[in-house]
Image (cartoon, helix red, strand yellow):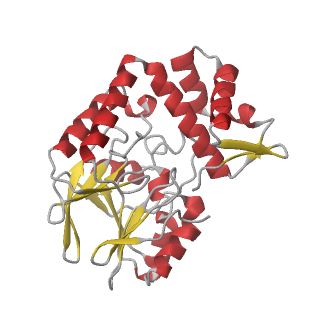
Amino acid sequence: MVCSQRPVEILDGLFFVERGYLNGNHFVYRCDEPVLIDTGYASGVETTERVITNLGVDISRVKLIVNTHCHCDHVGGNWKIQQESGCDIAMHAIGKHFIDTRDAWSTWWSYYVQEAEFFQCTRGLRDGDVIVLGPHEFKVIYTPGHSADGIVLYNSANKLLLSSDTLWERDLAVITVRVEGSRAIFSMLESLDRIEQLEVKTVYPGHGRPFTDVAAALTSSRKRLHDFLENPKRMGNDLLKKIIVYTLMMKRSVDEDSFFDYLMTTPWFVETVDHYFNGEYERKYRDVIKKCHGRGIIKCRDGRMYTTVKP
């Protein structure tokens, strides 16, 4: 596994690490007591550790991990890094509750059959709290919608926003009504409203490259959300496509002939097709695979299916 981009120093000592599009980006603050913001997938923790080490940071000296939410592509490295360093881990108080109570449903881990291990969350964050990284202060802003415990981090001095999965440049994070509830889209729209009130020059998202046209990203996200409200099947198609690709990425490759049968054992695939597409399981599966094949996102070789999306 490789990172898609070399770490970039965005503030003195603070590095942005862009990962493959469906893996979570993260940040490293290099100092005597290093701080990490998000840690990527569990399956990519060796790469995460290598990037951190190459920045001159000793994993055993990590003092704190801050998580923007509890999904597996953002907390996957937590357990191993905490075992090596004994570090504190901070996340929104709602996410802390999910971790403390070993709630694999609300974290999405059991619903989407994702790889992650529970860790010790030592601090619950609240809206308005401040995370201090040396001379840099980041305000915690609560932004539910994609995740019940979602936060973004805002540095007003430099007008930087670490937007996690609340705002991407040209796409939208998965909305999982089955876990987050029927209010999820409305919560996401309200979270975008909160971001619009900020003066932001540069956004460092949870997935994808940094960007500066915040107004365009907000407009695009709102349009997608309203499209989902008007035509829920669009949201169902978006979910099926992204989670199938996530699954292939986590598993590296799968047997082409048995992948559909595997998906039928997962709660998310069956419920999604039941809810949006009247239980037409095989038709929707073949439709998604065909479209992803056509775009070069999924390929098959020697009876194995894999995704070209990098972790």
Q: Number of callouts in the render?
A: 0
* Horizontal side, residue 7 vs residue 80: left or right: left
Specify the farthest residue to the right: 302
* Horizontal side, residue 27 vs residue 44: left or right: left
* Horizontal side, residue 187 vs residue 310: left or right: left
Residue nearest the observer in this picture, 191 or 268: 191
- Quarter of the C terminus within the rendering: bottom right
Q: Based on the displayed image, in which of its 4 quarters is residue 260 positioned?
A: top right
Which residue is drawn at the image coordinates 15% and 52% (left, top)?
A: 199
- The location of residue 112, given as percent across then percent down, is 55, 40
Residue 264 in sight from this viewpoint:
no
Residue 117 in sight from this viewpoint:
yes
Which residue is drawn at the image coordinates 66% and 27% (left, top)?
A: 285
* Horizontal side, residue 137 vs residue 278: left or right: left
Residue nearest the observer in this picture, 64 or 53: 53
In this rendering, is residue 96 above or below 181? below
- The location of residue 291, given as percent across then percent down, is 63, 31
Q: Based on the displayed image, in which of its 4 quarters is residue 263 positioned?
A: top right
Which residue is drawn at the image coordinates 45% and 71% (left, top)?
A: 82
- The location of residue 239, given as percent across then percent down, is 51, 33
- Quarter of the N terminus within the rendering: bottom right
- The location of residue 59, given as percent across then percent down, is 46, 79
In this rendering, is residue 65 above or below 52? above
Specify the farthest residue to the top: 278
